[in-house]
Amino acid sequence: MADGTIEIIEVKKSRDEIDADPDYAFKIAKAARVYEAVGLTLRIVTADDDVDIDPLLPNAQSIFADKFAYIGTRERLAMEETFEAKGAIAHAEAIETIAAAGGLPENRARKVLHALVCTRSAGIDITRRITRDSAVTKPERRGRRWAPS
């Protein structure tokens, strides 16, 4: 989510599917309590719900498609130094920083930035349309796996 919290989304065909099975309803209630205890939120979405997925879905798909882009040491260090010096930077500046550090073309640098987002070495609000001025930040937590603190 935009504020840094993680939301677990359970997707079902209809609310009736949940209400028809008391065991499932019990499981979901317990899961919600466990998620809440570790600082996560649970939301149940059904096909009947009017959920706005733009620009979230296209942004997530675009970034996730580049998750295996190679992140060189120079590119990673350049971003770390930039975050240390400036804090949040514009999306275009992040791409320029990566391109300059690694001698990469802009389209390749964008893929590296996406891989940095996937590894939580950089962050961007994917719930808003990503533009040249979108803020790229250093997340509080790093790494591919999340563990409760």
Image: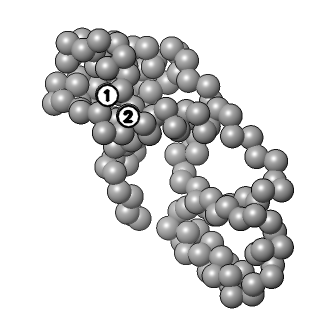
Q: Nearer the viewer, residue 64 or 3?
A: 64
Q: Which residue is mark 2?
A: 66
Amino acid type of disc 1?
Answer: Val
Q: Which residue is mark 1?
A: 112
N-terminal-most mark, 2 or 1: 2
Residue 104 vs 4, above or below: the answer is above
Indicate the quadrant where residue 19 lies.
bottom right
Residue at the image point whose x is 73% and y is 59% from the top? 45
Amino acid type of disc 2?
Answer: Asp
Left or right of residue 25, residue 41 in this image: left
The secondary element bearing badge 2 is classed as loop
Which color scheme is applied?
Answer: one colour
Residue at the image point whose x is 58% and y is 60% from the top? 8
- Spatial CA distance of label 2 from label 1 is 7 Å
Residue at the image point whose x is 24% and y is 14% from the top? 104
Left or right of residue 46, residue 68 in this image: left
Quadrant (top left/top right/bottom left/bottom right) for the C terminus = bottom left
Residue 115, position as x, y percentages in the image: 34, 35
Residue 84 in sight here: no
